[in-house]
Amino acid sequence: MKCQVCRGPAIIDVRRHNANFCQEHFLRLCRDQTKKAIDEFSMLEPDDRVLVAVSGGKDSLAVWDILGQLGFAADGFYVGLGIGEYSDESRGYAERFATERGLTLHVDDLLRDHGFDVPNGSRAAKRAPCSACGLSKRHLFDEAARRGGYDAIVTGHNLDDEAAVLMGNVLHWQTDYLGRQSPHLPAANGFPKKVKPLVRLTERDTAAYCLLRGIDYLVDECPMSVGNKHLSYKAALNDIEIDSPGAKHAFFFGFLDRAADRFADGSGETARVTISPCTRCGAPSSNEICAFCRLTERATQAVPIEMGRTRRRAGSRR
Amino acid sequence: MKCQVCRGPAIIDVRRHNANFCQEHFLRLCRDQTKKAIDEFSMLEPDDRVLVAVSGGKDSLAVWDILGQLGFAADGFYVGLGIGEYSDESRGYAERFATERGLTLHVDDLLRDHGFDVPNGSRAAKRAPCSACGLSKRHLFDEAARRGGYDAIVTGHNLDDEAAVLMGNVLHWQTDYLGRQSPHLPAANGFPKKVKPLVRLTERDTAAYCLLRGIDYLVDECPMSVGNKHLSYKAALNDIEIDSPGAKHAFFFGFLDRAADRFADGSGETARVTISPCTRCGAPSSNEICAFCRLTERATQAVPIEMGRTRRRAGSRR
């Protein structure tokens, strides 16, 4: 097995490229593919101040590392979600990565700063944990970027993630979501731009990248994601990829090339809405009170009395 | 386990309907769902003369049986494809079904009538077997319908088939095919209408239907379909369906409801073309010589000389 570039001994095969690579040229491939994605979707300008959403997993640490190598000024942002040991450990990985490299990591904590954590808050608010978690992270990322004057929020979503989200949107033909699915969500209505520079790399690539770069990351999946549909879409896509290497790439990038525009007409379920500051926190919102403040209210007002049941204070919303 | 309708003992569960049924009410469900599909997509008029494409498998025999029960005048049409024992057996099942019920079955044979069979013809024409087979069947079904003055060709495609085809089209974003994927392809340009009344039933439903109605059918899959991508799309969808009963139905009917129109704009790869009679066989075609006559020419001119290699006569097309 020889490296596609230098013909030296290869250490990894990349089936969708039908090629093998040595360490040096695999790492270069990862950087090149990231650069290509950034250029292709005009994700970042050279002098953008970048905030990387860091979880302590392989993808967010890999993208932070690669952005540094590509010369971007990138700080990290970590949100403590209160998911027991998993959160403690993931924070440790994020902090060690930053400290060892002299990088700046901002840390928020849902319980300390907002009075609830994902397990209890989602239960009290009668919301699926992944939904409460995603909503909280999006809000806090946006807030942190505004607060720190960052131009862009970078997330570590890779090709497997994006293909699985696309699969979910296609299986349900969620035309609104399909109209918005892009690796570059431009700044609008007071929200900073959000970009996904790893969309040309797979989970296997980012895991190998971290291994080869000596980046220590939290391997475990979030314990609350068990049963999450996206894991079953990923599994289905993995099975298809085994039979047809390159299938995920063709699915995701074929969508962007030939289909995304067909859903971007605003004729979906959600009409265009007026955005104004949330009356509680000032974040841009389509409602008087933003979704995060409503979640916070519900998550903090309910007092658990026994497993799986909650008592509500008078006047609390259902 | 009780029947959803009569509360008597149930013999089958239908997870996507979250319901169980006794024999009588399961058979009624199959008829009702077929009727519903026919009405929903205006597939057939009460006095249509119908030609059922019969393979001897569960789906084509089930749809023929159900159409009879729904009062349609339906004859059958079988094409011998020359796939060894598989073809001999499948013809036997089709003929016995027709004979036992006093139904009319027309029989064509690719080798007898056109000088080639699927295994040798596809090899000689350097075409995938499933592709040569599909092309031949479509052509011969159309021909038979025109010859016999039938108003509609009915095929036994079920929800699993249509969802798998849709998955393949979506994975590759074949926008042209997506624009045409419908359970009712109207008559146009000299082609009779083609309809798929079983799109609301699954493979499991039609297998159970045949078992309960005492319909003997060929269980084996075509031996040449091994490795066909559609089988891997079916497997992927089956895995998703296990986690989310109803997923296939939502995928296929959601597409028809909310997405199909977005691909029906004629902006795909194939522009609208002029149709005129094939100069060899007279079938409507977008070329001077239709695809079937070109296949026949290539499939019959090449003389096999050894396994996997063919010699071509001078002047044969590549």
Image (cartoon, coloured by chain):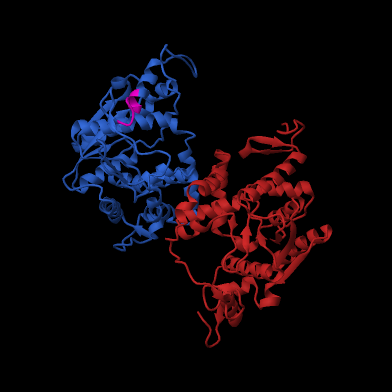
Chain colours: A red, B blue
Q: Quadrant of residue B221?
A: top left
Q: Quadrant of residue A194?
A: bottom right
Q: Is residue A182 visible?
A: yes
The quadrant the N terminus of chain B occupies is: bottom left
Q: Quadrant of residue A195?
A: bottom right
The residue located at (41%, 21%) in the rendering is B120
Given residues A260 and B155, the one toward you in this image is: A260
Given residues B278 and A22, the one toward you in this image is: B278
Total labels: the figure holds 0
Locate residue A304 relative to residue B288 in the image: left or right. right
Q: From the top left corner, tell me how far across and down residue A15 is, in percent.
A: 63, 38
Q: Write the start and end of the magenta stretch as one range.
A: B285-293
Q: Is residue B187 above or below residue A301?
A: above
Given residues A79 and B112, the one toward you in this image is: A79
The quadrant the C terminus of chain B occupies is: top left
Q: From the top left corner, tell me how far across and down residue B293 is, in percent.
A: 33, 24
Residue A249 belongs to the span the image colors magenta: no
Q: From the top left corner, tell me how far across and down residue A146 is, in percent.
A: 67, 69
Locate residue A192 relative to residue B198 in the image: left or right. right
Which residue is the extreme one toward the left? B47
The residue located at (34%, 51%) in the rendering is B200
Q: Is residue A232 visible?
A: no
Residue B288 belongs to the span the image colors magenta: yes
Locate residue B166 relative to residue B80 in the image: left or right. right
Locate residue A78 relative to residue B57 in the image: left or right. right
